[in-house]
Amino acid sequence: MNNFPKKATYTVKLSFTLFGTIVGAGFLSGAELVRFFPSEGFYAYAAISFLLYAGCFYLMFRCGAKYGGYERTLAALFGKGAPLFRALMQISSLIMCASMLAGLNAAAQEGLGFASAFPLAALAAVPLLYLMSGKGVKGLFFANLLLVPFILIFIAASARGFVGEGMHGRSADAFSCLVSLILYVSMNCYLAAPLVCDAGAQGASGGAGCVIASVLIGVATAVLLSGIARAGDAAREAQMPFLYALGGAKIRVLFTLICICGILTTLFSSWYPLQATAQGKRHAALRRAALLVAAFALSMIGLKPIIRFVYPLVGAAGAIFLAVCAARGRLFFQKPFFGERDERIHTGGKHAQNGGRRHNEV
């Protein structure tokens, strides 16, 4: 009982951090959602995404708890293929950092009316990323505890005006939409893998945090897609569809500030594996600076092209990564779901045997 406040606090930290990791520029703006979710009947897919997120988060958390963090999980489950997936993670994280920096530029242009040819918004975030280096999981927990509540409050307020669209869809599109959804969830969970695995290595129970984060992501998906659907096809074609759907100068400024909060939480999480690789090596400061320059250069491509062409490839890599973890980790049928019950059964059987009564004699 004395451990309950500590466990509850950790659950909140973990759930907010997982939510903040996923809900970045592409998510809050709606650009990712219109790329990977159908325009009709999306409530069912939002529910499926909740189940997929919950399973993937829990799988990675258990891998981290069993093997001792992300790097040891790679070594244990991928063997000789670990360097390949480590390199893929670095590239994917760099791409995600670039897309968040591009999202900052888009938010400044469309939401705040900042019409500069040079991406000053992204440039301003680069020193902040550099200062975050070395803070570890605890630093991410703190940043998300600070910023995620503002995102949740805004989404809850938006739900009142937008929920109600998207109950129906065309069954002919079901398979392709499901494949797109799996790629999208795989991409997000793959990019969150270093953080989730390292959080699992801390030894605390994380099942509740994984489920709560997944519920929040699923509900947010439904709310944002409802608003975009109500605004029509013009919203889906915009660089930031949900921002287009909101309309009005005052609400646009408020949403842009909320969107920036989501961008920063995802940006910090995406930067986590990159700075962890450079940390402790020779010329670590120069390595981090070079990675930041590369991310800034990639952000010049723009948010929509990165989401449209690069995200599916990252999603395919993520699907392979998660499949290997599920197949080789064999964690869904161990503790805590089945292990305690099995242990009680075996203990009871041993006690009966010691008492002189074997099972075949009952």
Image (cartoon, rainbow, N blue to C red):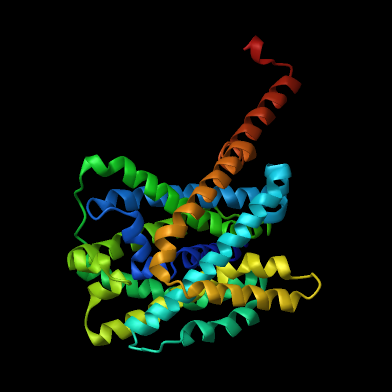
User: Where is residue 128 shown, x and y percent of the image?
Assistant: 58, 83
Q: Residue at x 38, y 78 (%)?
A: 106
Q: Residue at x 72, y 20 (%)?
A: 353
- Quarter of the image for residue 242 reads bottom left
Which is nearer the eye, 220 or 358? 220
User: Where is residue 131 shown, x and y percent of the image?
Assistant: 64, 82
For residue 131, say whether it is visible. Answer: yes
Q: Residue at x 19, y 68 (%)?
A: 231
Which is nearer the eye, 85 or 253? 85
User: Where is residue 108 shown, x and y percent of the image?
Assistant: 39, 84
Q: Is residue 70 left or right of residue 10?
A: right
For residue 9, say whether it is visible. Answer: no
Q: Residue furthest right?
A: 282
Which is nearer the eye, 163 or 97? 97
Query: In the rendered view of the protein, which quadrant contains the N terminus?
Result: bottom right
Q: Is residue 136 left or right of residue 179?
A: right
Give the number of marks. 0
The vertical placement of 130 against 315, above or below, is below
